[in-house]
Amino acid sequence: MRVVEITRRAALESHLLAIEARSWKAARQTSIGTEPAAERFYRALGRRFAEAGRLRSYLLYLGDEPVAHLFGLTHRGSYFALKSSYDPQREELSPGVLLFAHALEDCFDGRLSRFEILGDAQQWKRQLATHWRRSVDVCLFTHLISRCGWIHAKDVARPLLERHAPRLIALKRRVDRLRREEE
């Protein structure tokens, strides 16, 4: 087995999408490739961070076969693990655990001070984490709003949005301003 650090977007995309398509995520419709808008988003994100020299992703190979991926970015001394998956036919080898162990070691070799494992709280994340921080999910894909679970959470989301709307509007304005500055 070998791990390859990928900092160039083109080298990552085909293997990442292939691993995601073979994984359990495809059946649950959470794979990057199952939603065209999500795939476009991750491709654009990868492109922007690769151009800035902040794309850091890993592929785990068994021979010549890619069996796991970790898609991540660096920012202000931190590594953000955004998406990961593995080939379920290789599950007995714990490829995800091996890949995360390698990435953790690589990130803490003096270059980064924090490793953020994003996404839902899961048992394997609890086993790796030294502490937890609260976070808020923000749905950026308005046409995917049902996939974000907001349609089923109207009774919870509406009061929350009404209470926090001024801050959300301010956040949207900052994001819009940053996008205009990038163009």
Image (cartoon, rainbow, N blue to C red):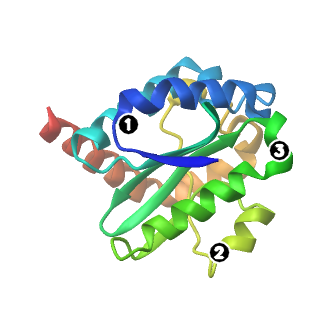
Looking at the image, is mark 1 or mark 3 earlier in the sequence?
1
Q: Which residue lies at the image location 51% right of the left edge and 69% below the top edge?
A: 105
Reading the image, the residue beneath label 2 is 129
Label 2: which secondary element:
loop
Q: Gap between marks 2 and 3, in whole Å? A: 22 Å
Q: Nearer the viewer, mark 1 or mark 3?
A: 3
Residue under the point 80% across and 34% down: 24
Earlier in the chain: of badge 1 and badge 2, it is 1
From the viewer's perspective, tell me whether residue 1 is left or right of residue 45: right
Residue 156: % across, % down: 71, 52
Crowd tier of the residue under label 3, counting other residues whose Cα lies within 10 Å: few below 14, some 14–19, many 20 or above: few
Q: Amino acid at mark 2?
A: Ala
* Residue receiving disc 1: 46
How much space separates mark 1 and mark 3, taking CA atoms?
27 Å
Q: Quadrant of residue 101?
A: bottom right
Number of other residues with Cα within 10 Å of mark 2, as a class: few under 14, some 14 to 19, many 20 or more: few
- Residue 177 location in percent, x, y? 20, 44
- Residue in view at x 62 percent, y 54 percent: 99
Q: Is residue 50 toward the left or the right of residue 82 in the image?
A: left
Label 1 Cα neighbours within 10 Å, binned few <14 / some 14-19 / many ≥20: many
Q: Which mark is residue 91?
A: 3
Q: Label 1 is placed on what type of residue?
A: Gly
Mark 2 vs mark 3: give the one in front: 3
